[in-house]
Image (spheres, coloured by chain):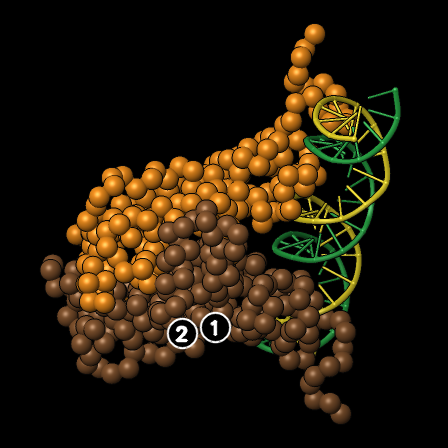
Chain colours: A brown, B orange, C green, D yellow
Amino acid sequence: MEPTSKPSRLGRPLSPRLSRQAIGRTALAMLEEEGSISLPRLAERLGVRQSSFYKHVTGRQEIIELARGALVERVPAPEQRTGSLDDVIRQTFDALRSAYREVPALLPLMLAQPVSHPAALALYDRFAAAFEQAGTPAHLIIPALEALDSAAIGATLDAYTMEAAWNIGDEDQSRYPHLSAAQEAVAAKHVDRFAFLADVLSAGLRATIDDA
Amino acid sequence: MEPTSKPSRLGRPLSPRLSRQAIGRTALAMLEEEGSISLPRLAERLGVRQSSFYKHVTGRQEIIELARGALVERVPAPEQRTGSLDDVIRQTFDALRSAYREVPALLPLMLAQPVSHPAALALYDRFAAAFEQAGTPAHLIIPALEALDSAAIGATLDAYTMEAAWNIGDEDQSRYPHLSAAQEAVAAKHVDRFAFLADVLSAGLRATIDDA
DNA sequence: TTTATTAGTGAAAGCCATTCGCTTATTGTG
DNA sequence: CACAATAAGCGAATGGCTTTCACTAATAAA
């Protein structure tokens, strides 16, 4: 006879079908594939009715927070024990950007609520440790992290949302002459905006930190 | 007899009660005061039923875009004709940040969709002109603007959302030692995160632009 | 004057998040 | 070992949301 799995339509199932981790991971996958989260569809994916979520979670917001956790799980720890400030800056920026770029649709949801998932806090803690070890003054660590995080988020959203957007409609080019000229120039030179941002942040952070 | 105003429950009203501008401005006000937009409540504010919106607008998304337009209307044009690159950088960052800080709740909504409002494009065009005039190479204007915009958005959201957030729960401080140490240090020194970001961007952008 | 268009209304459809009472399995206690 | 307490599902219902569509009355055009 079947040990676990499918039968029994009513009452507690033989083995649990949900867990906070499974919810977070599936929500993240749904965001990647469909671009949004809805509880009915999420429930369907997990072979469960929507009302079941509330045994594991207080509501939609917490599911988004679990998706953040699932995303953060993918970010690798900072590499080596000893790195220059430049290395740390670039590794941090790179790690954040790589994570975000795979699920841009999560960003607007994430940004609408505070960070509370332990895995996310732990990740920031690891980054803070790396900055500390690279000699950053304690009072500048958080500002530096915020700068990198903001830039990574912004760059991801720009690539995701804006790309098509301020590619201005052909006939309207004359309305925004400076903008469309700049647009053409950046396209012609295939500027790597991500590398540009990394350079800006590295130069700016190093200068400002050493100044202090 | 009353020339315009209230009577007539059915059919076209004597004078129009809605306009795209009014919708955008009221939506922005609602975001400032209530922190979110809903069409029923927006309709109530405007003395109208929700279905009326669809005579002026294709849907919720477009209303958000109109709110972006209303926000952008508040941003002053770049000051003087001739400014150093540093001036332009700081004025741009400042203008964006000042606008965003008054309606942080709009940011997650804005970020979920492309920029299409003419006033917003016109604003970016003015910024592009200022960079151009300050001698920025054409292919770096857009990347520089994106960097400033991202940073302004990130700084605003950090102040709005995170403040309470990675103020870690007291008992959990030991779980994130580096983060909470950094948190204490930044609090003790009253670091002005906004000024820090402005310095980082200014130094970084100038270095990277002059390099090219 | 007639006709077309415009800007409102009202009702309804369909999605969504959330709550609650119910059922069945598991866990802990005397 | 019985048996209470708890845990994890389900089903149904509520209330909010966006959007659509047929309607009505005022204005603009022919």
Q: Which mark is residue A98?
A: 2
**Number of numbered discs on residues:** 2
Q: Are marks 2 and 1 in contact (CB under 8 Å)?
A: yes
Nearest the viewer among A67 and A9 is A67
How many C-alpha atoms fall within 10 Å of the one at disc 2: few (<14), some, or many (≥20)?
Answer: some
Q: x%, y% of residue D18?
A: 65, 48
Give the residue furthest to the top: B1
Q: x%, y% of residue A164?
A: 51, 61
- Any part of residue A179 in sight: yes
At 42% from the left edge and 72% from the top edge, which residue is drawn? Answer: A99
Give the residue furthest to the bottom: A1
Kindly identify the amino acid type of the residue bearing the numbered disc 2.
Ser
> Left or right of D10: which side holds A112?
left
Q: Which mark is residue A102?
A: 1
At 44% from the left edge and 65% from the top edge, which residue is drawn? Answer: A159
Vertical arrangement, residue D23 with respect to residue B199, above or below: above
Helix, strand or loop at disc 2? Answer: helix
Kindly identify the amino acid type of the residue bearing the numbered disc 1.
Glu
